[in-house]
Amino acid sequence: MRSVFLGPPGAGKGTQARMIAADGTVLHLSTGDLLREEVNAGSALGLKAKRFMDDGKLVPDELVFEILFAKLGLGKGMARAFILDGFPRTRAQALELDRRLAAVGLPLVAVVNFVTSEDAAVARLSSRLVCRNCQAAYNARTARPARDGICDRCGGELYRRHDDDPDVVRVRFQEYRQKSAELVAYYQQSGLLRNVDAELPVAEVVRQLRQQVFAKK
Ligand code: ADP
Ligand code: AMP
């Protein structure tokens, strides 16, 4: 299953991708997570990406392509099943992804569109907590960890992302509104798009995904 998860910030893409990938049969690649790892490592790519991320803007394509396609390992040894979470975010990125996958004869199979109102997503982001180590998401109101401030999965420290501050969230949604319509239209045309109601509880969303998209054939 070669898939893409689309949707606004806070729609629950990362939460769902982690659950689907938990059994180790699917590779979960989040460009946001990969970029934050570069920023934390202080790499040249991370330094270039950081100012865009801090402002809530999209990082230039060449930086995102470099990091994503290296991890995806196009060609021999490429994961048979993957979820791209937060990539592509523009039609241009989608075209480049299609081009690279076509070159190795392994096109996308499904694109999941996480449909949610902006109000619901903004509310989630206002109380999101993220693990500094494994980047798993929690929520101070609705999905608290067993021990305050500590990741259930890896024991890492939980923190609030700077770009979840209201001023930056506003810019991130502007970016999303500007770029998502043509991206969704592109995948609709290709016949790959499947909408999920991302406002449902976590367990219900994952049930739908398992039934409708990741059913074992
Ligand atoms: P995304 O990866 O799309 O930006 P996350 O998976 O990080 O979103 O989720 C954003 C926030 O919303 C987190 O605090 C997470 O715990 C919470 N969340 C995720 N899915 C749901 C859901 N279905 N219902 C309620 N809260 C959710
Ligand atoms: P996310 O973790 O998906 O919320 O992404 C956090 C930030 O990383 C975004 O606001 C962008 O600055 C950057 N980013 C993540 N994915 C992409 C992408 N596909 N294209 C451009 N920038 C991205």
Image: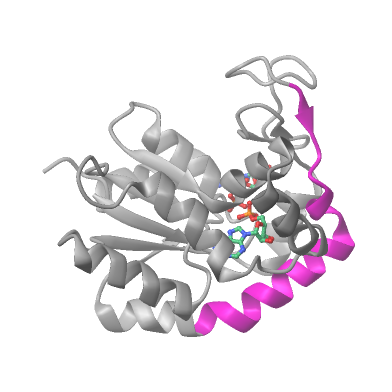
* Residue depicted at x 33% and y 79%: 188
Q: Ligand 2, what quadrant? A: bottom right
* Residue depicted at x 81% and y 40%: 160
| Residue 87 x/y as whole percent | 48, 61
Q: Quick check: can you spot residue 135?
A: yes
Quarter of the image for residue 144 reads top right
| Residue 49 x/y as whole percent | 70, 58
Quarter of the image for residue 17 reads top left
* Residue depicted at x 36% and y 42%: 207
Residue 169 among magenta residues: yes
Vertical position of residue 111 compared to residue 36: above or below: below
Vertical position of residue 105 compared to residue 175: above or below: above
Considering the whole magenta stretch, tell me its main secondary structure. helix
- Tell me if 63 is positioned left or right of 27 in this view: right
Q: Quick check: can you spot residue 193?
A: no
- Tell me if 4 is positioned left or right of 61 in this view: left
* Residue range highlighted in magenta: 157-181
